Every structure is written in structure tokens, then in C-alpha cells.
Amino acid sequence: MLKVYGTKTCPDCRECKINFDRNGVAYEYVDLNASLANLKEFLRLRDRLPVFDGCKEGGSIGIPALLSEDGSVTLDWEGFLTAQGLPVVYREQGAQACSIDGTGC
């Protein structure tokens, strides 16, 4: 099953979750703030996969991160939806970015 790593405090993660729910996408949500075990699970991915290199260099966390059953990871939840022919149905108005440079999470 698809895993989505994120937090309730991240505007991008909230949008991803709302869109996946409204489009009926089956996934397991791993809230990084819920436990240290969840955070460590995410950090193991983030520390070893090149898909996160740009995030680390730019000061963002790299969430929401989508881990597919085949082990591939994408940080583009909107692209994931559109690739499946599903619409982006919700955009949070006035959401603040949560990275150091003010763009993304």
C-alpha cells in the first residue's frame, strides 16, 4: 500500500491528505509528529535516497513524501494524482510555507 509521510502542521501535507481522501486514494498516512518511530522511519528514507537531496540542500524537510509499494519515492503528490487521471480538488487558501526559505515543506 502507498505510504504518505507528513505532519498535520504542514500545509502541503494537509492538502495532499485532503486530495487523496476526496479522490479515494488508498494510502497509509505516517504522521511524523505522532511518534519518534515514525520520524526515524522517515529519516531512514530521507538520509539514503537521492530524491531528497534538493530538499536537504534547500532547507526543506521533503514532505509530503509518497513511498510506493515498489520502493520508489516521489515528493510530487499533485503529479501522482494527475498521472492517475485524478484532479487536484483542494488548495488551502493562505497557507504558510514551512521551510527555512519560505517555500514548501
Image (cartoon, helix red, strand yellow):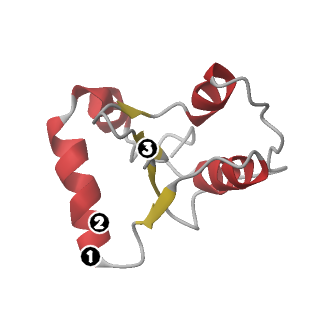
What residue is shown with label 3? 65
Q: Position of residue 62 (x, y in %)?
A: 40, 42
Establish if 40 lies above or below 56.
below
Q: Residue at x 14, y 38 (%)?
A: 48
Q: Residue at x 60, y 24 (%)?
A: 79
Mark 1 crowd level (few <14, some 14–19, many ≥20, 10 Å Cα): few
Which quadrant of the structure image shows residue 5? bottom left
Mark 2 crowd level (few <14, some 14–19, many ≥20, 10 Å Cα): some
Q: Position of residue 44 (x, y in %)?
A: 17, 52
Indicate the secondary structure of the residue bearing disc 2: helix
Which quadrant of the structure image shows residue 46? top left
Q: Are marks 1 and 3 in contact (CB under 8 Å)?
A: no
Q: Position of residue 75 (x, y in %)?
A: 46, 34
What residue is shown with label 1? 36
| Amino acid type shown at disc 1 | Leu
On residue 39, which mark appears? 2
Q: CA distance from mark 2 to mark 3?
A: 12 Å
Establish if 102 lies above or below 30.
above
